[in-house]
Image: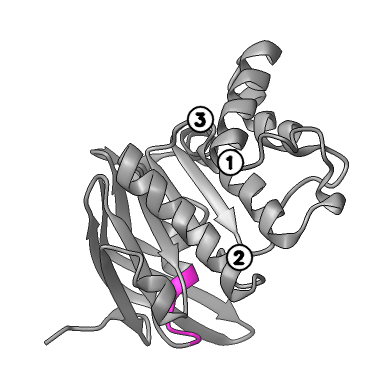
């Protein structure tokens, strides 16, 4: 489903060049739940951003479902992300003035679906994440766990080929984190959803089928 080939990402900080990724090669199979782990500064989020087309490698390329994305323009990448990829972030990234349903279906409207189709899809996915009774509640009236469920619903509403999650439980307590991770596992097991998740918690990674460990911008070799 996803192949990262010799990915290098260099950032310029003043006069200094910092190589966050140093020729990373990864393969993720369709329907796999993969966790990316490593110490702070190892390149976890940078790698997720490359694989999820949120950033562009300095060199190397990313192939998603046999589509080589390296030759895409920024506009083409934006369209590809909108129709094929889903994202969950640690800060929820919800629009405060929109209710749960509106936060979920706004991306569907951007795809050109009718309002009726959007509302129906939003209601269905919010019910699936346990928020069927909170369709019209604003984020400010929700707990952190409920807001993250809305974020997950938004990411899954258009049935993305890949769901990317960057520290999705960082702002949640242990019990709520389990509920969120249980949701990920449910969609992975029952729907075959491919998931790539960055985490620093070993017990979070235990939900995944496989762990990719980074250190100093390279994939650690496992014995």
The answer to whether the residue labelled 1 contacts the one labelled 3, judged by CB atoms less than 8 Å apart, is no
SS for tag 2? helix
Q: Residue at x 32, y 62 (%)?
A: 34
Judged by its main secondary structure, the magenta piece is loop
First in sequence: mark 1 or mark 3? 1
- Residue at the spot of label 1: 153
Depth check, mark 3 against mark 2: the one in front is 2
Specify whether 110 is left or right of 128.
right
Q: Which numbered circle lies on residue 180?
A: none
SS for tag 1? helix
SS for tag 3? loop
- Residue at the spot of label 3: 158
Q: Which residues are magenta?
A: 40-45
Q: Magenta stretch: residue 140 in it?
A: no
Q: Magenta stretch: residue 44 in it?
A: yes
First in sequence: mark 1 or mark 2? 1
**Front-lying residue, 223 or 82:** 223
Q: Residue at x 67, y 59 (%)?
A: 145
Q: Residue at x 31, y 78 (%)?
A: 213
Specify whether 140 is left or right of 66.
right
Residue 50 is situated, as x and y percent measured from the top left of the image, at 43, 59
Q: Quadrant of the C terminus?
A: bottom left
Residue 148 is situated, as x and y percent measured from the top left of the image, at 64, 55
Depth check, mark 1 against mark 2: the one in front is 2
The answer to whether the residue labelled 3 contacts the one labelled 2, judged by CB atoms less than 8 Å apart, is no
Residue 5 is situated, as x and y percent measured from the top left of the image, at 24, 60
Displayed quadrant of residue 57: bottom left
- Residue at the spot of label 2: 176
């Amino acid at each position: 489903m996803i192949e990262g080939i010799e990915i290098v990402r260099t950032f310029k900080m003043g006069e200094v060049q910092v190589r966050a990724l140093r020729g990373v090669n990864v393969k993720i199979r369709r329907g796999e739940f993969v966790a990316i782990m490593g110490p702070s500064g190892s390149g976890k989020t940078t790698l997720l951003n490359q694989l999820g087309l949120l950033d562009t490698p300095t060199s190397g390329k990313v192939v998603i479902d046999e589509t080589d994305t390296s030759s895409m323009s920024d506009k083409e990448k934006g369209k590809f992300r909108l129709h094929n990829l889903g994202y969950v972030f640690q800060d929820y990234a919800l629009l405060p003035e929109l209710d749960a349903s509106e936060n979920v279906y706004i991306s569907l409207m951007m795809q050109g679906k009718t309002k009726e189709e959007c509302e129906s899809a939003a209601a269905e996915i919010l019910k699936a994440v346990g928020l069927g009774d909170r369709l019209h509640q604003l984020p400010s009236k929700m707990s952190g766990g409920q807001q993250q469920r809305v974020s997950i619903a938004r990411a899954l509403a258009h049935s993305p080929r890949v769901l990317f999650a960057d520290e999705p439980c960082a702002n949640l307590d242990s019990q709520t984190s389990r509920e969120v991770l249980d949701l990920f596992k449910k969609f992975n097991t029952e729907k075959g959803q491919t998931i790539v998740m960055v985490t620093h918690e070993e017990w979070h990674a235990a939900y995944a089928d496989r762990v990719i460990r980074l250190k100093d911008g390279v994939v650690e070799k496992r014995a």
